[in-house]
Image (cartoon, rainbow, N blue to C red):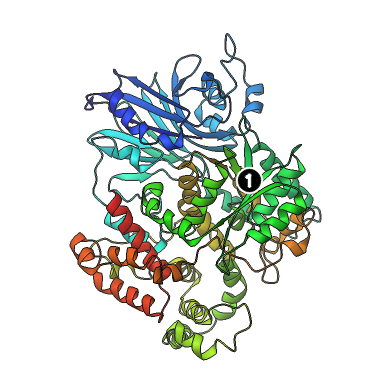
């Protein structure tokens, strides 16, 4: 796991290529503290930089940028190829033998022998690759199939700049600094900037499975070597109905292979364990195939409703892992808030970024690699919105839309706090804040179709344009999603195309790489994703509970009673913090005079939301956090 950066300047406008590339790559020192490399070719105008976090082959033989044995290709590469040993066995060895045992050398050898396209098709892993072809004078940028590793690129004054994080491009003097108002509008809805946008105009995120070729003439050709939409389409037409009786055994074998591959490392390795279904399944399979006790890590909060550590401890005790739990006080969690803009490098407002950063910091004390359960919800149908879409929406949709809109208006007219006072004593124990739930039901009732329902459920601000002085929100949902999908599957597709790479995976990548920790995600092995889209809905959702197939596998390793409980998000008590210890910090960033002078927001609706939140009339925690994280980023950069 590393950081990559560089540029292609065919017109020779960058005066000192080595120093400029060094500045770009040194901005990513946190991603790769173990080694540093810069390679340039003055005649062609190419510069490749690399910061290395040594995981496989810790020797100098793994140094990058690395040239192929025949000398035609040079690569700067971030990631891991988990089947590199098998590929090595398939390839004829180079004259004189291999230099070492790094996956980078096998990647280059594959490109030499098979060609780039055929090599990419064979790779199992995650990666961001910058490959220079010295013969064709062509730069190719590639991002892994699911978007686990980030890759930004931009074209300025005839130069192509690229890097693992936005900060690397900003270190190049040609990079523009203008904020993209359309990207800001998209961010205000989702709390992240969706690909292919970035917060800077002219800078783009390469899409998952994307490939960008830049020829000697500077012409840019954008394409894909793998497309999730194609996998979804193929799965929908090859779906198994009903599920075979041995499906759990077959899928346990598939998951075991994905987990075992990701346990390959020449450095200490562990796993995140929340005690939920996904992380428990990963750790159970790790421990079942490990000769030593797996190091597992969990984080706990003292606030009721946010503490999963006791559940994780019980699972760890049953599995026999070497478990560490870390309880975070409010002061320690709040101390992380001022660091978030620097860690995430782009406006990002998923509040679970706080515990994610904290658990990465905890694990890095003992290990360099950690496995996580990310992707399990998207693969096996674990989000509550899937239940809503599959079970309840078909009952609501036939009702006339005007009638549903009237019901929505009646439910959302009283503030949530009013509903809490009126009905709180009548609500079942453990139901939580009934007012917020009735408001969410109102948003569901008012939706015209399943796409509108999904959009309402994921929106931090339902109308970003009302907050912004400029900017037009781009297409709100990704296009090209196959039509032969159920309501739940349509939501899954949208999540895998947007929320997963741009929120979940971006959150984990930045938090982990800020402390030089590599996080691997077995559920996002592309072979599992392709097979997962062939599963019938009943393999995922039954009786209002998701992950049915994964549960069957997990119960072979962990007693049901240790797992079965209501789903708990990896969150923090943000609502209370904004009214308490974060109040002064937030008030300074939300000051109306500051908002007006900066020229991005209309102050009035934000001020109104802030006042309503402080008074307790409404809970605007997520919408306000979105504004606050942009404001914090703006001050940082």
Q: In this rendering, does residue 490 appear at all?
A: yes
Query: Residue 581: x, y in percent?
Result: 40, 66
Which residue of the protein is positioned furthest toward the bottom in this rendering?
422
Q: Quadrant of residue 266?
A: top right
Residue at x 39% of width, y 68% of height: 623
In the rendered image, the vertical position of residue 60 relative to residue 241, given as above or below? above
Relative to the observer, which residue lies in front, 193 or 560?
Answer: 560
Q: Quadrant of residue 549?
A: bottom right
Residue at x 41% of width, y 70% of height: 580
Which residue of the protein is positioned furthest toward the top in this rendering?
96
Q: Total label count? A: 1
Residue 24 is left or right of residue 538, and the answer is left
Mark 1 — residue? Answer: 271
Q: Secondary structure at mark 1?
A: strand
Which residue of the protein is positioned furthest toward the left in this rendering?
597
In the rendered image, the vertical position of residue 60 relative to residue 536, given as above or below? above
Relative to the observer, which residue lies in front, 176 or 334?
Answer: 334
Relative to the observer, which residue lies in front, 482 or 140?
Answer: 140
Query: Residue 126: x, y in percent?
Result: 54, 39
Query: Residue 528: x, y in percent?
Result: 64, 47
Query: Residue 294: x, y in percent?
Result: 70, 42
Residue 319 is left or right of residue 603, and the answer is right
Residue 176 is left or right of residue 283, and the answer is left
Q: In this rendering, does residue 403 appear at all?
A: no
Residue at x 33% of width, y 77% of height: 611
Crowding at dot 1, Cα within 10 Å, few <14 / some 14-19 / many 20+, comes out as: many
């Amino acid at each position: 796991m590393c950081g990559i950066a560089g540029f292609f300047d065919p017109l020779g406008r960058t005066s000192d290529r080595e120093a400029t590339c060094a500045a770009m790559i040194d901005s990513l020192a946190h991603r790769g503290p173990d080694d540093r490399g810069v390679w340039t070719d003055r005649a062609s105008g190419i510069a490749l930089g690399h910061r290395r976090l040594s995981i496989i082959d810790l020797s100098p033989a793994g140094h990058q940028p690395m040239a192929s044995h025949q000398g035609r290709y040079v690569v700067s590469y971030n990631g891991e190829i988990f089947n590199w040993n098998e590929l090595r066995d398939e390839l004829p060895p180079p004259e004189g033998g291999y230099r070492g045992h790094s996956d980078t050398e096998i990647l280059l050898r594959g490109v030499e022998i098979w060609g780039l396209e055929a090599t990419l098709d064979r790779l199992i892993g995650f990666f961001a690759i910058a490959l220079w072809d010295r013969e064709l004078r062509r730069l190719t940028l590639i991002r892994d199939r699911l978007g686990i590793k980030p890759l930004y690129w931009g074209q300025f004054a005839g130069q192509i700049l690229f890097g693992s994080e936005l900060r690397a491009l900003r270190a190049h003097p040609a990079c523009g600094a203008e904020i993209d108002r359309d990207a800001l509008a998209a961010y205000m809805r989702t709390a992240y900037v969706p690909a292919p946008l970035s917060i800077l105009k002219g800078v783009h995120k390469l899409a998952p499975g994307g490939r960008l070729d830049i020829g000697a003439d500077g012409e840019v050709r954008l394409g894909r070597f793998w497309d999730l939409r194609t996998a979804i389409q193929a799965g929908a037409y090859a779906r198994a109905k009903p599920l075979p009786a041995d499906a759990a055994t077959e899928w346990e074998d598939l998951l075991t292979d994905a987990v075992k591959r990701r346990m390959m490392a020449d450095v200490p390795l562990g796993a995140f364990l929340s005690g939920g279904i996904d992380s428990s399944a990963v750790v159970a399979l790790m421990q079942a195939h490990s000769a030593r006790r797996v190091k597992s890590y969990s984080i706990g909060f003292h606030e009721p409703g946010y503490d999963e550590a006791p559940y994780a401890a019980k699972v760890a005790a049953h599995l026999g892992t070497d478990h560490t739990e870390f309880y975070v006080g409010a002061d320690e969690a709040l101390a992380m808030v001022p660091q978030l803009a620097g860690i995430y490098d782009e406006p990002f407002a998923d509040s679970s970024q706080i515990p994610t950063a904290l658990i990465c910091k905890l694990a890095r004390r003992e290990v360099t690699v950690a496995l996580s359960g990310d992707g399990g919800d998207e693969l096996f149908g674990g989000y509550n919105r899937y239940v809503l879409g599959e079970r309840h929406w078909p009952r609501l949709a036939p009702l006339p839309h005007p009638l549903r809109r009237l019901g929505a208006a009646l439910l959302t007219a009283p503030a949530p706090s009013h509903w809490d006072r009126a009905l709180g004593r009548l609500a079942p124990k453990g139901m939580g804040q009934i007012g917020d739930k009735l408001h969410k039901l109102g948003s569901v009732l008012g939706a015209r179709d399943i796409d509108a329902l999904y959009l309402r459920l994921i929106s931090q601000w339902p109308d970003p344009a009302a907050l912004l002085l400029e900017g037009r929100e781009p297409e709100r949902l990704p296009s090209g999603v196959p039509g032969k999908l159920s309501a739940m599957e349509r939501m899954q597709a949208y999540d895998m195309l947007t929320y997963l790479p741009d929120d979940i995976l971006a959150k984990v990548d930045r938090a982990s790489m800020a402390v030089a920790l590599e996080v691997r995600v077995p559920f996002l092995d592309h072979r599992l994703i392709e097979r997962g889209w062939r599963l019938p809905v009943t393999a995922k959702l039954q009786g209002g509970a998701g992950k049915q197939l994964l549960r069957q596998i997990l119960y072979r390793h962990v007693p049901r009673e240790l797992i079965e409980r209501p789903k708990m998000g990896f969150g923090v008590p943000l609502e209370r913090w904004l009214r308490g210890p974060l109040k002064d910090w937030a008030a300074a960033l939300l000051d109306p005079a500051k908002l007006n002078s900066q020229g991005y927001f209309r102050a009035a609706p934000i001020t109104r939301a802030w006042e309503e939140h402080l008074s307790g009339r409404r809970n605007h925690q997520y919408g306000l956090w979105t504004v606050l994280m942009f404001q914090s980023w703006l001050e940082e950069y």
